[in-house]
């Protein structure tokens, strides 16, 4: 984003150039409408959109009962609710842009040993030498070393859940629909994919540790999944090998400290229940890049407390709301109590009747709500 405005950026990554070009990530990402606009602004979306499957409808239900809550793009005049994009493709396209830019220098295979800040600049000490800059942006994921060396404290909570991620092919078209089915053992998301003539979906099946052990021990993964899938898009004709992700939340108490600012999962790594982690990180980057370029134009010190406080204020509400929403949603729907179950079922139906609430939550999930006062 900054290089598009001809500002010089140095990217240090622990992975080598070769590793990042050959990356294999079996997940897909739900890219919100707002994120697609950010990528459009920096001329990357035109390279992705042909491989992006639009989501026009989302159906939410308690178990397989019925579709108790629906979100349809036609209710707003903003285009699709989001897009499903293959992660391997997305990562490669973005990394190639980085390599082709005259304003970005990439150094791979970096092992950060320490970070020190002074009044005028910050320094990264690493196996590849020392690097000085007025500002360090920690975008190094949920186990961020930048966060550790900057001594930024964070909240951690283990959900005792895992997500099985895999793809299925089915006999019927998904018709650009995504399904989110909530079970007390964890939610199941079916996300429409473009390939196989719209007869493929990406699956994110979250289960608690108890069910995970059972599934792996008794080898009844497919049976158990088929019960929950319940022929949503006809019979399953093919299933890929599942990849397993342990689920936890990491959330920083501060977003910056002494010339180091965190974005994306390094600052908040959330539950994938709503497919929003990458979208939140893209919005972090978008607003940070905007504040940095505005500050540079005004001749301000981009690593100063004043500038980074401005960034914090702009991002606070969006981040807090989403972290809380995903955390609470997961807790609410993983609860076995009969009373909570009744509240949930009725809640979904009542929610479905309020076009105001539905439109507001769609705008929020699509990343189109404005929080930067
Ligand atoms: C099962 C699952 C499904 C998901 N689905 C969605 C979805 O549909 N939509 C969505 O928006 N989000 C989704 N997410 C969340 C999304 O994957 C993350 O939010 C996103 O990948 C975070 O991006 P990031 O760039 O901040 O971190 P990462 O993707 O973790 O990238 C970190 C980068 O930093 C580098 N790095 C790491 N450590 C170091 C170090 N010590 N030194 C230097 N470099 C380092 C890495 O090599 C990498 O390049 C999902 C997550 C899971 C687990």
Image (tube, grey):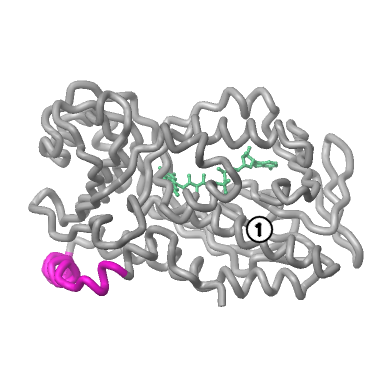
Does the image show residue 341? no
Query: What secondary structure do most residues of the magenta stretch adopt?
Result: helix
Depth order, front residue of 293/140: 293
Whether residue 239 is in magenta: the answer is: no
Q: Which residue lies furthest to the front in this view?
A: 77
Depth order, front residue of 175/145: 175
In this picture, residue 306 sits left or right of residue 180: right
In this picture, residue 267 sits left or right of residue 169: right
Please rate how many residues cluster around mark 1, counting C-alpha atoms within 10 Å: few if below 14, some from 14 to 19, many from 20. Answer: many
Residue under pointer 1: 262
- Residue positioned 50% across, 57% down in the render: 280
- Residue positioned 39% across, 45% down in the render: 30
Q: Residue furthest left?
A: 65
Count of number-bearing discs: 1
Ligand 1 is found in which quarter of the picture?
Answer: top right
Does the image show residue 288? yes
Depth order, front residue of 359/328: 359
Quadrant in the rendering for residue 73:
bottom left
Residue 320 point in image, percent of width and height: 49, 70
63 vs 155: above or below: above
Q: Which residue lies furthest to the bottom in this view?
A: 373
Whether residue 345 is in magenta: the answer is: yes
- Residue positioned 38% across, 44% down in the render: 83
- Residue positioned 60% across, 53% down in the render: 266
Residue 29 point in image, percent of width and height: 42, 42
In this picture, residue 202 sits left or right of residue 44: left
176 vs 269: above or below: above
Q: What element carries label 1?
A: strand
The span shown in magenta is: 337-359
188 vs 372: above or below: above
Residue 301 point in image, percent of width and height: 84, 67
């Amino acid at each position: 984003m900054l290089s598009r405005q001809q500002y010089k950026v140095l990217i240090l990554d622990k992975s080598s150039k070769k590793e990042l070009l050959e990356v294999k990530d079996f997940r897909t990402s739900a890219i919100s409408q707002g994120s697609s606009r950010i990528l459009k602004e920096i001329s990357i979306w035109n390279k992705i959109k042909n491989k992006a499957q639009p989501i026009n409808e989302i159906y939410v239900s308690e178990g397989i009962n019925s579709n108790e809550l629906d979100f349809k793009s036609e209710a707003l005049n903003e285009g699709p609710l989001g897009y499903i994009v293959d992660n391997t493709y997305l990562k490669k396209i973005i990394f190639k842009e980085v390599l082709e830019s005259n304003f970005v220098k990439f150094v791979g295979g970096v092992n950060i040993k320490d970070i020190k800040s002074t009044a005028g600049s910050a320094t990264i000490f690493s196996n590849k030498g020392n690097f000085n800059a007025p500002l360090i942006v920690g975008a190094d994921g949920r186990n961020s070393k930048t966060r550790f060396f900057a001594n930024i404290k964070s909240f951690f909570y283990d959900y005792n859940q895992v997500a099985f991620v895999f793809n299925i092919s089915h006999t019927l078209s998904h018709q650009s629909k995504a399904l989110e089915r909530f079970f007390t053992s964890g939610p199941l998301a079916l996300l429409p994919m473009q390939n196989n003539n719209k007869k493929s979906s990406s699956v994110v099946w979250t289960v608690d540790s108890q069910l995970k052990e059972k599934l792996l021990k008794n080898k009844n993964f497919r049976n158990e999944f088929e019960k929950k899938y319940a022929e949503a898009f006809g019979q399953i004709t093919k299933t890929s090998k599942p990849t397993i992700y342990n689920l936890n939340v990491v959330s920083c108490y501060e977003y910056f400290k002494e010339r180091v600012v965190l974005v994306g999962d390094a600052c908040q790594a959330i539950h994938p229940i709503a497919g929003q982690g990458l979208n939140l990180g893209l919005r972090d980057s978008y607003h940070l890049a905007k504040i940095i370029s505005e500050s540079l134009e005004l001749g301000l010190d981009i690593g100063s407390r004043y500038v980074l406080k401005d960034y914090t204020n702009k991002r606070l509400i969006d981040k807090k709301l989403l972290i809380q929403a995903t955390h609470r949603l997961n807790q609410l729907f993983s609860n076995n109590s009969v009373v909570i179950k009744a509240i949930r079922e009725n809640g979904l139906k009542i929610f479905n009747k309020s076009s105001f609430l539905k439109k507001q939550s769609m705008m929020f999930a699509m990343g189109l709500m404005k929080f930067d006062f």
